[in-house]
Amino acid sequence: MKSLCTGVILAGGVASRYSGEVKAFLPVGGKKNLDRIYQVFTELFDEIILVTNNPIAYIDWDLIIGTDLYPVRSSLTGLHAGLFYASNPYVFFSASDTPFLKGKLVRILLNKIDNHTDVIIPETSNGLEPLCAIYSRRCFQSIEHHLLKKDFKIRNFFKKVHMKTVPETQLRQQDPNLLSFFNINTPEDLKIADQILKEEP
């Protein structure tokens, strides 16, 4: 599946509750968020792209660096850029503040790729997880159309494409506690993440 799918890390966000520190660099158990995600990506993807508007900060990582094509900070803008730079027909996206992303969970999504589906997305009791999902490059034009309309909600373009959801029961087979979707937004989240590391086998 490596040859079919590119891995894209969206690193556009800053941690406003950490004096503007980049969320990708927040340490969990002494290891940066980005290092944890990058380790998973290297096992899954031959092509790894990081989308950021501060490229210099990431020159130490062996990956392709791209910037947003639209001057608006939004997750949809990041998806648009990732699809633009990717050379493969499908792209798996992850935010840069999810330290517990499980490669086994991503493989569940990768195994769902087919020629007719444009979006492969996890669905849990909390709803859809659009930043831990696979998008076909066929989504590019639809996303660009929404950007031009200044409609920046990811879910609003789903009705224009063929989408496949992956239910929580399947996801829990490889990630029982759904930790792949845990992200760090606050100092309290960081404390919880460190505690999770202590409890994880």
Image: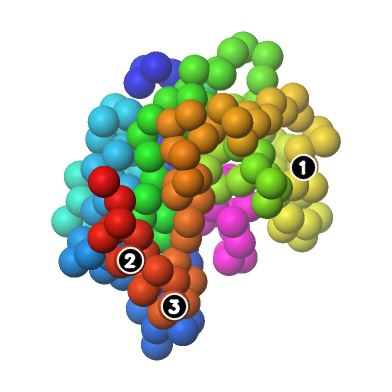
Q: Amino acid at mark 1?
A: Phe
Percent from the top left, x then y, of residue 154?
Answer: 70, 49
Q: Which region shows up in magenta?
A: 68-81
The answer to whether 147 is drawn above or below residue 109 in the figure is below
Instruction: Give the x, y percent position of residue 41.
Output: 31, 38
User: Of the residues shown, which amino acid type is indicated by label 2?
Assistant: Gln
The image position of residue 101, as x and y in percent, is 39, 45
**Quarter location, residue 145:** top right
Q: Label 3 vs label 2: CA separation? A: 11 Å
Residue matched to label 1: 157
Q: Secondary structure at mark 3?
A: helix
Q: Residue 195 bears which disc, if any?
A: 2
**Among numbered discs 1 and 2, the one appearing first in the sequence:** 1
Which of the two discs, 3 and 2, labels the residue nearer the N terminus? Answer: 3
Please state, as top left, top right, bottom left or bottom right, where the N terminus lies in the image. top left
Look at the numbered discs 1 and 3 and tell me whether their residues touch, using CB distance below 8 Å.
no
Mark 1 to mark 3 CA distance (whole Å): 33 Å
Residue 132, percent from left and from top:
52, 43
